[in-house]
Amino acid sequence: MYMLKPEETRPLKILLISPQGKMDDDSNQKPLFHMALAVLVSLTPPQHEIELVDEHFHDPIDYDGKYDVVGITSRTLEATRAYEIADTFRAHGKKVVLGGLHISFNAEEAAKHADCIVIGEADNLWTTILDDVAGNSLKSTYNSKDFPPVKEITPIDYARIAKVSKREKVDGTKSIPIYVTRGCPFNCSFCVTPNFTGKQYRAQKPELLKEQIESAKKHFFKANGRTAKPWFMLTDENLGINKKRLWEFLDLLRECDITFSVFLSVNFLEDPETVKKLVDAGCNFVLAGLESIKQSTLEAYNKGHVNSAEKYSKIIDDCRKAGLNIQGNFLMNPAIDTFEDIDELVKFVTKNHIFMPIFQIITPYPGTQMYWEYKNKGLITDEDWEKYNALHLVIKSDRYDPLLFQYKVLKSYTDIYSWRHIAARTWYNPKKMINLITSLAFRNHLRNQLAEFERQHGINPKILEGIK
């Protein structure tokens, strides 16, 4: 029997949507588009017409559009909104495909809102879905395990994304997303990556990566007097598997004449040569999961044997002197951390002038080992997915009233984005423009969240006085 090739399938009109969770932030750190949807755009045969909508940029959705299929990707925080969009499109008679991290681990829940569910990476099954839509034979589920494994990274077609999205060119204060690698061989309990992509670690071919960067520059970057180079956000789950590989990637990026930000283990930053290579390659800042400054807490996270507050201070100072910003990500756990611990963390962040610090409440996301452990022990108290933004307490708390713990974290987080703290960090840290612009975006968002929290719960800041 003759089988159609993907490029021979009848032309379809496709809408791809990245929903914004109702409690998701509007910070300046958001990339220009969702990389999962960028992969789908890049894989879609040329005869199909695509429209890309991203609610993080407040793109409008046309529910009356004449689409053959609507694809929606979703993280946990976005799931409720994704379901709302899906239900509305289905009420308008459209076929809806749901996929992404949350959907992959909650297929039964998501199936109520879609004609089709995608589980796992879609690289090797997307054209099959399009063929089946065109042939009116769309299945209810497509599981990546039933298709060949994704052994290579799909090159991103920046020209096509520029054409089908609503994004215009940006200067170097807003980020263009790109993959250097995908996957991670490690198995951290709080991370969904090993259970979604597996442990296969894949890297871009150097020549293809360079081509994509040049294409992204052409279609998305406009130079101005403040920013002569584009800022790329490396969306890798783990760029630094080992020092040799990391150095190879950094040498490659240096040839591309860009600036970039990346998530990286703080332990790589102890090495002065690695820090120098990061700076020489154009790294604006490194996001590092510092988790805590309390030694017993670090030990509880199996990091106490290698990390400490003193070590963090030295690394941050050494990196700053070398011209590299370190963005610290800190985790609060009501079973471990007291209000006094949170106050000490604020002092540490202030003293070390940490670049764009992030405070988060421990959150067991579906698909992680942590989620299954907490679920089995009955420690998860709330599965309202809108609250899974790492600023709501969704697990059992014996020490503090959950509302007070949330308020303490949010109030402390907002306080470190006061004008005084922003001015000090901007003064002490390199890359002052990006520091200031992103800090202001954080400040505005956090102040709005805090005001809404106080209004919604009738809370006065004095309620925290005297609680330790």
Image (cartoon, rainbow, N blue to C red):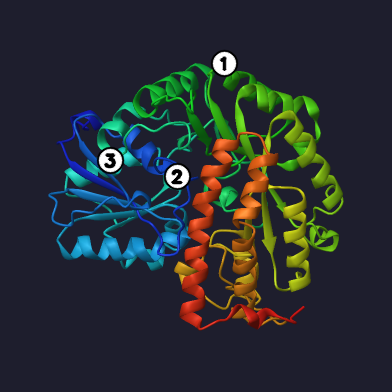
| Residue bearing mark 1 | 255
Give the SS element for disc 1: loop
Examine the image and state in which quarter residue 367 appears.
bottom right
At 41% from the left and 55% from the top, the residue drawn is: 74
Give the SS element for disc 3: loop
Looking at the image, residue 206 sits to the left or right of residue 291; the answer is left
Kind of residue sitting beneath label 3 = Lys
For the question of whether residue 23 can be seen, the reply is: yes
The one of 209 and 433 positioned closer to us in this rendering? 433
Q: Residues within 10 Å of mark 2 (few under 14, many from 20)?
A: many
Q: CA distance from mark 1 to mark 3?
A: 30 Å
Q: Quadrant of the C terminus?
A: bottom right
| Residue bearing mark 3 | 166
| Residue bearing mark 2 | 121
Residue 323: % across, % down: 69, 30
Give the SS element for disc 2: loop
Q: Foreground mark, 2 or 3?
A: 3
The one of 460 and 236 positioned closer to us in this rendering? 460
At 45% from the left and 56% from the top, the residue drawn is: 75
Residue 170: % across, % down: 39, 33
Kind of residue sitting beneath label 1 = Glu
Residue 202: % across, % down: 56, 32
Looking at the image, residue 63 sits to the left or right of residue 169; the answer is left
Q: CA distance from mark 2 to mark 3?
A: 25 Å
Residue 51: % across, % down: 24, 42
Closer to the chain start, of discs 2 and 3, is 2
Examine the image and state in which quarter residue 91 appears.
bottom left
Q: Residues within 10 Å of mark 3 (few under 14, many from 20)?
A: some
Q: Foreground mark, 2 or 1?
A: 1
